[in-house]
Amino acid sequence: MRWFLLSLSLVLATAAPAQSVRPVVPGEISADSAIQREVLPLRTLPRRTDFAGEDLLYSVRYGFIEAGEARLTVTAGPDYGGRSTWKVTGTGRSTGALDWVFRVRDHYESHIDKAGLFPHHFTRRVREGGYRLEREIAFDPARRSAATTQNGRTRHHVMPAFVQDLVSAFYCARRLPLNRMHPGEVIDIPTIVDGKIHTLRARFVGPRSVDVKAGTFEGLAFAPIVRKGRIWKDADDLTVIVSADDRHLPVLIESDLVIGSVRLELVEDRSVLEGAQAASIGP
């Protein structure tokens, strides 16, 4: 019954580990070695969208069951070495009768560098029935390293430059010039997932209009490249649609699984954005 964690992960990441790219286990180093690594410059990217003030509510359906809800919020985050961040929080919870038989309370949080769009800190807390997981990753992007704490133990690893976590990977993708992509083009984003470096890949399918509970949107459809087998029957069993405006809101995610299907759709955009971004609220 791990479908809910999968659903929320799809909302946050827009992609799954690519079938054609093998995950890599990052090299482990000591804490002393991590702090002694060379300090390298941090990147600054062209700024297209300010996510501060976003508040998005989603419904989660598993087959014919209204199973839960997910929420994504963006607020001002802490500074890291003088670099300001967004604090992006993703939560998922079971609702209705399911909450009595299989209680779900999931929490994801990422502190994303506003200028460089890479993570400084990532938290994942999972409560699904009897399953529990607590993991924190403290990134040191200047030294290309990270410290992961789980079950009271901290381990240090060498990381690729500006590697993403599950949450920041999605926001990084939203800042790309998606409107200029051609059908068949692929987005690649190196991301750490469960202790391994994966290349999250999504192929642009084309423009697609979509009706969801929040309204009608002109959207852009992507097909994250997934692994066939235990979860998906075919490599194209997952579709992600984002709005075609500059915000690239995640509007709809549909997935046919080996057993059943999952649908996440935008129910309400509660965002309170400032300046020009406020005009983009809603469909």
Image (cartoon, grey):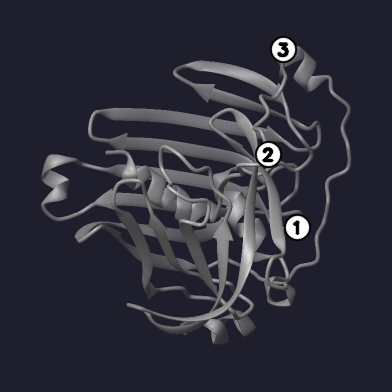
Q: Position of residue 249 (x, y in %)?
A: 53, 71
For marks 2 and 1, the one nearer the N-term is 2
Instruction: Report whether 253 appears left or right of 93.
Output: right
Judging from the image, what secondary structure is the residue with disc 3 in?
loop
Q: Which mark is residue 129?
A: none
N-terminal of the pair, mark 2 or mark 3, is: 2
The 10 Å Cα crowd at callout 1, few under 14, some 14 to 19, many 20 or more, is some
Q: Is residue 41 left or right of residue 48?
A: right
Kind of residue sitting beneath label 1: Ala
Horizontally, is 75 left or right of 100 in the view?
right
Numbered disc 1: secondary structure: loop
Earlier sequence position, callout 3 versus callout 1: 3
Q: Is residue 213 above or below residue 91?
A: below
**Residue 30, image x, y percentages:** 72, 12
Q: What residue did someone put label 1 on?
A: 115
The percent coordinates of residue 163 (x first, y second) are: 71, 41
Q: Are marks 2 and 1 in contact (CB under 8 Å)?
A: no
Question: What is the crowding at mark 3: few (fewer than 14 residues within 10 Å), some, or many (at least 20)?
Answer: few
Q: Amino acid at mark 3?
A: Ser
Q: Are marks 3 and 1 in contact (CB under 8 Å)?
A: no
Which residue corresponds to the image point at 53% horizontal and 23% vertical from the top-left?
Answer: 149
Which residue does the numbered mark 3 point to in the structure image? 30
Q: Residues within 10 Å of mark 2 (few under 14, many from 20)?
A: few
On residue 21, the disc is 2
Q: CA distance from mark 2 to mark 1?
A: 29 Å
